[in-house]
Image: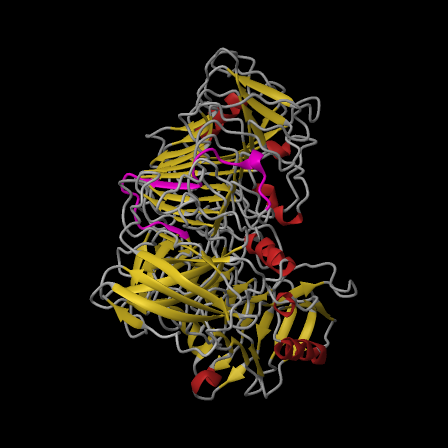
Amino acid sequence: MKFLAWVIAFCIGFGLLPQQQAHAIAPICVHHNDSAGLTQALANAVSSGISATIEVEQGTYTVPPTGWYYPFAPRQDISLLGGYIPSTNCQQRLITASPSTPTTNTVLDGQSQNGAAITFSLQQDNPGNLPYGTLVLEGFEIRNLQSTSNGKSSTGLYITHDVSDGYSGGIVFRYNWVHNVVTSGTVVQLDTGGALNFTNNLLDQNVGAYTTYVLSVARNTAPWRIVNNTIANNTGEGLALDQHGSYLQLFNNILYANSSFDLDAVGAVVELHADTYGTSTTSGSGSAGSGSITNHGYAFTGVNPGYDATTFHLNAGSGSINTGAAYAAVIPSQDLDGNPRWIGSNPDRGAFESNASDQAYWVVTNATDSSHATDATVNCNPGSTKCTLREAVTRANATGPSLIAFHLAGSCGPQLIALNSPLPAINNAITVDGYSQPGAASNTVSFDSGAAFNPVLCVIVRGSIGSNVSSAFVAGPTNFGAQLDVRGITFEGFAGAAVSLSQGTYHWIHGDSFGIETNNSPFVFSNAAGVLFGGGAIFNTLGGTAPADLNMLGKMSDATMAAVTINASSTNGHLGNQVVGNLIGMDQSHGAVPNQGTGLLLQNSDRNEIRGNVIVASALDGISLIGASSNWLHDNAIGTLPQAGFNYVSSLSNGGSGIVLSSGSANNAIGVFDKTAYQMGYSNVIQNNKGGPGVWLNTGAGVGNTVLSNSIGSNGPGSGSGGGALAIDFGPLGSAVGGGDAISIFQSYMLGSQTVLLNFVITGNGGDPYRIDFYANINPSSCDASGYGPAELPIQTYSVVLPGSGTVIQGYRAQLPVFGINQSPSYVTATATNLATSGGTSQVSNCATLLNDRVFADSFEAKSVSGG
């Protein structure tokens, strides 16, 4: 969900964002085989300096011997998208980039002319520390480039963020086929200090020292994930990874039969998840020093992946079929032929998905709760009308990977299956597809549209009234082979978590309703709780990025339980569990459906990613972290809708704080992933939480927690706490603990329409570097009674090193090319974040009234003065 979009729209409306900064070129359609039209569209995007999407019809486009070089402005989002069907004016799209689909590919062809190379870049810009753009190249066959010169011009395809002062944005390189490129250097080089999405590409038959060289130009701001690529049969190294940041994750790649090493961790910490590669090295010669490679599950080394050497499709019987990591949060939706990506219990490895499925097929045709063990007439043989859900799960557990579908008489019904006890514990890879019931349909509406969601769920699974059934689906501590994919089910009436999974990997709960009515279910009973991932259950996904994947969780009746609980620690890798794109406390019409406990609980659980969720109407806190460390929470709306701006809806309020950290919860990132990356992005909207501050670091919370680049305002009861009950607070509510670091603004003046002068005092640990984040605040009544403020709109950030005394007086002129401030009255606040290893973010500063006063326009005051 595009949570920053409503912020930008709001700022335009209130004069906080210059109109020219908000514009983007309308999508440009380049028609079939129009090479001149494509180069003109790229040149126009460069000259405009604003964001552009260029849609290219299927056909062939020539790259001349002079090559392409397009240096875009640093704030531009540039998307170059292939696959549009000719004669549709780019209204229809089919992405193919495969040896098997030559007539529907979108081809960039260098015709083997020396100098026919491609470079796209975002150029460095000052002042920095504001959002950089994203470069997207998607859906192309790229062939016959040739570059044998020295330097960057020796690269066939070069995409770079040429920046050093801000690291949001990134590179998306997806659904591309690169072949027959000849260079004296690198075939494809991607340089970025931002996020990287390198997914579902084929690179083969190329010549160069490196086929793919991926480099972090500075420090990455988010995990890099490299998923379902085939890099094979090239002259030179296959995939070289050189990165300053924390780690890279590889899923389901085939790196094989390259003439040098297939995988080179030049200077990167590389995690492998179900990848196949021939040879590897950790050369240690890169910018980040010596690298490392670790196997986090099912990686094959030295094993022939079993592909056709011409088309690179998997051969029948290949060990790469149905053996990929089923980590739903990162798996692409299609392969390079344009076919669905995931067929069978697990996706295939590499760039192509075979049609082979390893799943047995069971069809539920009877809604009673019985099994063959209790009723000899119950069976799930082909054509049976007495196959129950309980018997289907029993058969699936005994058989192996299985798909359970529904064909209950009476079409959509809704069809009610009332359980007298939990279903047999899952001990296999089992998919339960409620959308297979005739009449069912998944949601097609994105949150950004503002429209009501439209799922039609026909199958209801209920804990029988009076039977006190704790859960529907369970995986206990000894069910090590459990892998549950359940979708299209309404759960109601359970005395515990309706889905409770404490063992296994790659569980995926998506497109379900927990206690909430949908278009086909006029009344649904509550559950005590919704979903539990506990114990040894890792690499699980609740929800997903597609509209069809969102879950709705509401009316949870037990105040001692959260709607969603994760107490499974992902020790086997990073960011192992994902909660993505769910509605917690809200129904399909955006109305409140209150939960009696906390919305989301992370307890003794580390390295999870919580993103893109709406968490509202909880009687207690929105999100609670208890003994939970190294988690990343971003792009969530907590206590409000993401489109709400600063118009708060009281029915959506969480009863406690927005986010609470306690019991040693340490090194969590709320907002920006990497505190040393001076960016704005990955923001949470934390507003309208009426029982406490937006973010509360309770007594006993650990160190190193950062709260950066969020929108936090109108929280708390106005209790007058030293940290402000409205934004970030430390220790007991109502105290002035502050966490040891503090910032106080004593002057704030406008110098022109887009420059603000801020004079302030920072107190902290002498000798440590600090990051200072400034916020504009729109609501004039949102400051706490104590004078401390919210942090509604992030505007800029910069760094400073404290002197030995631990106190410094600073003057700073904030140049605001994106978020200007020209409305008065308004307030400015700030936070200070210690960049040392265990450093965290301070409370929010005092509210400083932003005055339109030119007395200080001579700039003498904007200097740093060390204080004692």
Point 50% across, 29% down: residue? 595
Quadrant of residue 532 within the rendered picture: top left
- Magenta residues span 647-670
Percent coordinates x, y for residue 321 in the rendering: 48, 49
Q: Quadrant of residue 403?
A: top right
Q: Does the magenta stretch include residue 828?
A: no
Q: What number of labels is visible?
A: 0
Residue pictured at 62% horizontal, 71% vertical: 50
Q: In this view, does 473 lie above or below 178?
A: above
Q: In which quarter of the image is the C terminus?
A: bottom left
Q: How is the image coloured?
A: secondary structure
- Residue 126 picture location, percent across and down: 47, 76
- In screen coordinates, is 404 left or right of 541? right
Q: Is residue 520 or residue 809 the one in the foreground?
A: 809
| Residue 669: in magenta span | yes
Q: Single out the residue that lies furthest toward the left.
A: 804
Task: Let me know if residue 329 appears in the view.
Answer: no
Q: In this view, does 691 lie above or below 850?
A: above
Can residue 379 be seen here? The reply is: yes
What x and y, as percent, mark residue 552? Answer: 56, 35
Q: Position of residue 217 (x, y in %)?
A: 40, 72
- Name the side, left or right, on which 260 lies relative to 27: left
**Of 650 and 42, the residue lying toward us:** 650
